[in-house]
Amino acid sequence: MSLAGEERKRSIMTLLNEKGKVNVSELSQIFDVSTETIRRDLDELEKDNKLKKVYGGAVKFKVEVEPPHYEREFIHAEAKRVIGALAAELIEDNDVIIIDEGSTALQIIQFLESKRNLTILTSSIPSLISLIDHQKRGLYDGKIIFIGGEVNARHLRVSGPIAEKIMEDFYVNKSFLSVDGISLENGLTSYDLDRALFTRKLIRSSETAILLADSSKIAKRTVAKIMDLPDIHMIVSEEGPPSGWIPSLKEMQIRWISPVSE
């Protein structure tokens, strides 16, 4: 069968996830294309950090782990700042919002000075500290509600059954959410099951669920399923969507916000 390039690469990744290794000659026969075309596909997938090329084919990467919070702050820092500024533009006076844990969501706070009478819920210890600091300096006007729960010292966040129980008493206008992977096939995923279950609770408590994701998270799957892609309403990124995603996003009525779309 002959498939368009992006669809073929997605199928290659599916085979790789199932088998752990793929062979150039076999892929050439499966997709009815030349071995040079397959090698070019593997080159592009390797550049996107999806696989590792080896002689005659490719293998899966070793299982990734989530970097600690202090490391994540310095990864894709400029992209995260751009995303934070775009996300802040979606916030209106009097909104009740969630700022999720994560170094991208944290960037929103510096752009809230012009907003009035907000109520912000957060499970992020760095976001809590930043909000308190901004409020003391007269740069944030509104309430701060910290979502209690089991503390993860490595990632400076709370999650677990206590945090999920607390969220049963709240409904918010908008939630600004962090995830570790977004794909059309696998939806939203996280490295951590407790965090995945808590993020699911945040989405269900929100009128509008907004994902904050730099381009390294796109077309990526991690270990713990959060929800399917149609369960969210917007994606904010520093880049536009992959071209092959546009028809699916339109069908799912998901708005993609990036500097090029504004």
Image (cartoon, rainbow, N blue to C red):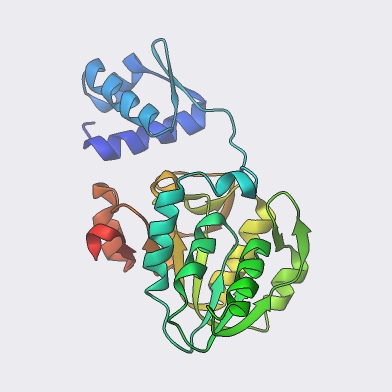
Which residue is nearer to you in this view: 200 or 85? Answer: 85
Which residue is nearer to you in this view: 165 or 139? Answer: 139
Residue at position x 41%, y 83% in the image: 92
Residue at position x 43%, y 44% in the image: 216
| Left or right, residue 86 beside residue 64 | left
In the rendered image, the quadrant that contains the N terminus is top left
Q: Does residue 185 show up?
A: no
Tally of numbered tags: 0
Q: Furthest-top residue in view?
A: 55
Residue at position x 71%, y 62% in the image: 159
Image coordinates for residue 99, horizontal then vertical, percent: 55, 69
Residue 29 appears in which quarter of the rendering?
Answer: top left
Image coordinates for residue 196, horizontal then vertical, percent: 61, 57
Which residue is nearer to you in this view: 92 or 18? Answer: 92
Q: Does residue 179 show up?
A: yes
Image coordinates for residue 21, horizontal then vertical, percent: 48, 22
| Left or right, residue 123 beside residue 13 | right
Q: Is residue 245 above or below residue 32?
A: below
Which residue is nearer to you in this view: 101 or 168? Answer: 101
Image coordinates for residue 240, horizontal then vertical, percent: 28, 54
In the rendered image, the quadrant that contains the C terminus is bottom left
| Left or right, residue 127 beside residue 51 | right
